[in-house]
Image (cartoon, helix red, strand yellow):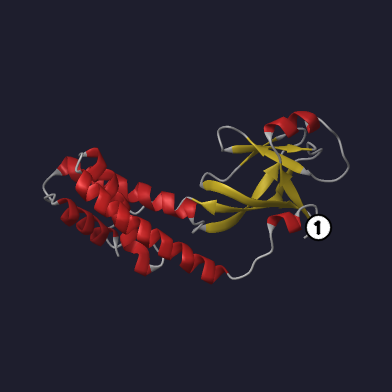
């Protein structure tokens, strides 16, 4: 479905006229939010980028569209994520070679790495991550990260959100049932498409 078709789908389900500006804005927002949530839930928009290190600085800026970090590699090694509690035990340590661990800051826009790099280096590491998809804007825009047969899931999630806010609980329940069924089908589809994969635990501590 295009963005225009998604809006029409939701508007028809809610029996909202095209002239209702306030409701149209609400529909647009609900569609965008549903799409972002699905992208994060099913890791639909995976991509990679490089990270820069600054000498004697533990903080590293992440790409602005990062939703979830899948892996970070520096040189031939996977940099391991740790908790804040673990960070307190290793922060400030000096070990030869590149960083070995990282922790995500509360803002989710930066990480802290340890050991701290001795030199400033561009493209010092590669981050593989789930990205927030670019917002739909033009009528012809399509949520291409989602298989076409599941585009109505976005619409049903938007219908549910708006119906709940309007206290139309019968419509909200109906939309929730349809959305849950579609989400289950999408999950099965993604599992089939993914095929067998190595566990993260099997990769911990090993060079690439």
Q: Where is residue 157 in the image (x, y as percent from the top left)?
A: 32, 52
Q: Position of residue 122 (x, y in %)?
A: 70, 47
Q: Nearer the viewer, residue 182 or 38?
A: 182
**Crowdedness near tag 1: few (<14), some (14–19) or many (≥20) residues, C-alpha within 10 Å:** few
Tell me if 21 is positioned left or right of 112 in this view.
left
Q: Name the residue under label 1.
A: 207
Tell me if 191 is positioned left or right of 81 in this view.
left
Q: Position of residue 7 (x, y in %)?
A: 23, 55
Can residue 185 be seen here?
A: yes
Residue at image location 29% in from the left, 50% down from the top: 158
Q: Is residue 137 above or below residue 116?
A: below
**Quadrant of the frame with the C terminus:** bottom right
Tell me if 168 is positioned left or right of 120 in this view.
left
How many numbered marks appear?
A: 1
**Quadrant of the frame with the N terminus:** bottom left
Q: Where is residue 138 in the image (x, y as percent from the top left)?
A: 29, 57
Tell me if 189 is positioned left or right of 69 in this view.
left
Residue at image location 25% in from the left, 41% down from the top: 164
Residue at image location 35% in from the left, 69% down from the top: 149
Label 1 sits on a secondary structure element that is loop
Q: Which of 137 and 178 is in front in this view?
A: 178
Q: Quadrant of residue 13?
A: bottom left
Residue at image location 51% in from the left, 52% down from the top: 131
Can residue 137 be seen here?
A: no
Q: Nearer the viewer, residue 19 or 33?
A: 33
Q: Residue furthest right?
A: 96
């Amino acid at each position: 479905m295009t963005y225009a078709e998604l809006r029409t789908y939701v508007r028809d389900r809610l029996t909202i006229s095209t002239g209702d500006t306030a409701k149209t804005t609400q529909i647009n927002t609900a569609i965008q939010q549903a799409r972002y949530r699905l992208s994060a839930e099913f890791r639909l928009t995976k991509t990679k980028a490089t990270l820069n290190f600054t000498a004697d600085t533990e903080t590293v800026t992440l790409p602005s569209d990062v939703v979830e970090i899948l892996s970070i590699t520096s040189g031939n090694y996977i940099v391991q994520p740790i908790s804040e509690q673990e960070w307190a035990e290793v922060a400030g340590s000096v070990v030869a070679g590149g960083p070995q661990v990282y922790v995500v800051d509360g803002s989710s826009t930066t990480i802290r790495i340890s050991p701290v790099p001795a030199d400033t280096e561009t493209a010092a590491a590669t981050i593989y991550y789930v990205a927030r998809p670019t917002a739909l804007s033009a009528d012809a825009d399509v949520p291409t990260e989602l298989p076409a047969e599941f585009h109505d899931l976005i619409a049903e999630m938007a219908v549910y959100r708006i119906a709940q806010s309007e206290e139309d609980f019968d419509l909200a329940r109906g939309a929730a049932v349809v959305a849950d069924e579609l989400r289950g089908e999408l999950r099965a589809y993604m599992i089939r498409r993914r095929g067998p994969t190595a566990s993260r635990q099997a990769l911990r501590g090993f060079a690439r």
